[in-house]
Image (cartoon, helix red, strand yellow):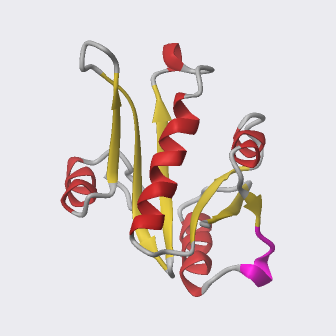
Amino acid sequence: MNGHDAGSPQLFRAHINQNLCFLMVDAADTPIGFATCGVLDRALHLYELAMVPEHGGRGLGKALIETVCAEAKSRGLDAVTLSTFTDVAWNGPFYERVGFRTLDDDELSPGLHLVKNHEADIGLTHRCIMRREIK
């Protein structure tokens, strides 16, 4: 397991214990998507959002984002943040459509600088940090 193993049982357990893992299921109660988050600098940071490909294009990813935003609001946080690949054609446009904007380096909080630096240290390139304000 490396330092960025988003699928490790220990990491999922930690997110679940903090009520920061959101699961979407189908009518048969089969998992079809999830979002995992953590609190970072007055924001809920979205570490991972995933959907079973067969369920894509139905607005379910957007519904998970809205659930994450509702959780951020209920916790009194200012925003939802995330980092994503800039060289994957659908990532940025999807997040922009659901209210995120790309941050410039001078807009990054101390925690987001750590996220960006950690990702670079483990070889994740072509990344950007995005933010959606909570109203």
* Vertical position of residue 7 compared to residue 79: above or below: above
Q: Is residue 22 left or right of residue 107?
A: left
The rendered magenta stretch, by its main secondary structure, is classed as helix
* Vertical position of residue 86 compared to residue 135: above or below: above
Residue drawn at point x = 73 percent, y = 38 percent: 88
Q: Is residue 125 left or right of residue 114?
A: right
Residue drawn at point x = 69 percent, y = 56 percent: 125
Residue in front for this viewpoint, 72 or 44 = 72
How far across and how far down the image is residue 76, in percent? 45, 75
| Residues rendered magenta in the picture | 103-107
Q: Quadrant of residue 83?
A: bottom right
Residue drawn at point x = 46 percent, y = 64 percent: 72
How far across and how far down the image is residue 122, in percent? 53, 62
How far across and how far down the image is residue 40, in percent? 47, 76
Q: Quadrant of residue 38?
A: bottom left
Q: Is residue 22 left or right of residue 85?
A: left
Residue in front for this viewpoint, 120 or 131 = 131
How far across and how far down the image is residue 75, in percent? 39, 71
Q: Is residue 33 left or right of residue 114?
A: left
* Vertical position of residue 63 compared to residue 111: above or below: above
Question: Does residue 104 show up magenta in the picture?
Answer: yes
Q: How many marks?
A: 0
Question: Does residue 54 show up magenta in the picture?
Answer: no
Q: Quadrant of the C terminus?
A: bottom right
Residue drawn at point x = 63 percent, y = 20 percent: 57
